[in-house]
Amino acid sequence: MMPTRDPQRKIFLIATEESGDRLGSALMKVLRQRLGDGVQFEGVGGRTMAREGLETLFPIEELSIVGFAAVVQQLPKILGLIRETADAVTESAPDALVIIDSPDFTHRVARRVRAKNPAIPVVDYVSPSVWAWRPGRARAMLGYVDHVLGLLPFEPEEYRKLKGPPCSYVGHPLIEQLPSLRPNLDEQKRRDSEPPVLLVLPGSRRSEIRHHLGLFGAALGRLQAEGRAFELMLPTMPHLEATVRAGVATWPVKPQIVVGETERRAAFRIARAALAKSGTVTLELALSGIPMVTAYRVGAMEAFILRRAIQVSSVILANLVIGKDVIPEFLQEDCTPEKLAAALAEVLSETPMRKQQVEAFAQLDTIMSTGNKSPSVLAADIVLTTMRKGRRS
């Protein structure tokens, strides 16, 4: 008797930001290796997912909306895209739906899909920050998510405590990029030499840059006025370069602006310390072994909301992964040039603060290890298992 051949498997993926697009692309690559010609991809994605064969339902740039006022203005369009995407999923009836990050969009799609066709398994790649705010989301996700793929090692336990869907730690994409973050012998010599290279990382969005550039410039001017020597480097991306150059024009100390991901990583490999906006970059710096001072300032209304919503002692991602508040953070009114300059002086010198950070960062490889499997392979394993459970007859 001839063996039966598996029918073609269909996987629908939704990623609406560049970071999610990169995750989706790596996942698609592994799934294609596993399933060969027996897999068909549909969904929403960007350029890197397109290179893996995805024809996107709409360009993800249509969702590049920043700011509360802009969101309100574009709300009818956003809601229309949510409906359009959910309808496309249910019409396709895939073997699995993989939603990648962007929970404000992807979770609304998943809820609609679950209501229309409960048989479609849903995998959520990148957990929303249920451990930081709105913890009730975890239990709500039970109604429309079958499995969560966490990028942070503490997330599975948080989902257990919050009674959410099953969550597995698959690893952060940064752990696959360590060679590009860590110095070779010559770069280490520059990292250790004088004057030290100080990185400035004001944010990846124009609104963040506006909130932080003036403050950072004042802090660095104060540090220089106190007689501290340093070489300043400010990495940015091409679409933000003009905004950054305009913002630093009045700084008392001029940074070397480096543009693009390759130059950015090269700057990381020689830096002694950093002044950074809170966010994923703190984990990137920590994995690079760079002690830092972090700051975060937002508008008054956003600050009012965040103060009442945040459930954790630190908003620094690296602190949360390490399990200890080793990186100083200065938020809102606490975020002053005087305080930032004083803290920067400490991380630029061999002080207890710097030593504590360096020792804590050395533990990250162990804390974030995924054994001998890459994040995309672990993610693919779970998608395939979930897909088989929900396999169509």
Image: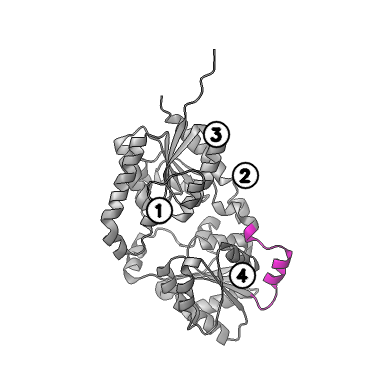
Q: Tell me the quadrant of the picture where the N terminus can be found.
A: top right
Identify the mark at residue 354; answer none if there is no mark. 4
Does dot 1 land on a helix, a strand or a loop?
A: helix
Mark 1 lies on residue: 60
Label 4 vs label 3: CA separation?
49 Å
Q: Amino acid at mark 2?
A: Gly
Label 3 vs label 2: CA separation?
25 Å
Span of residues in magenta: 180-196
Mark 3 lies on residue: 36
How far from the left and from the top, in percent, is residue 262?
59, 62
Q: Classify residue 228 by image quadrant.
A: bottom right
Mark 2 and mark 1 in contact? Answer it, CB < 8 Å.
no
* Residue nearest the viewer, comparing 312 with 281: 281
Q: Mark 2: few, some, or many residues within 10 Å (few <14, many ≥20)?
A: few
Q: Earlier in the sequence, mark 4 or mark 3?
A: 3
Q: In screen coordinates, is 294 left or right of 352? A: left
Q: Residue at x 57, y 54 (%)?
A: 174
Q: Amino acid at mark 1?
A: Ile
Q: Earlier in the sequence, mark 3 or mark 1?
A: 3
Does dot 2 land on a helix, a strand or a loop?
A: loop
Asked whether the viewer can see residue 45, the reply is yes
Mark 2 lies on residue: 371
Mark 3 and mark 2 in contact? Answer it, CB < 8 Å.
no
Q: Earlier in the sequence, mark 1 or mark 4?
A: 1
* Labels 4, 3: front one: 3
How far from the left and from the top, in percent, is residue 256?
58, 76
Queried whether the magenta region covers residue 54, the answer comes back as no
Does dot 3 land on a helix, a strand or a loop?
A: helix
Queried whether the magenta region covers residue 188, the answer comes back as yes
* Residue nearest the viewer, comparing 176 with 57: 57
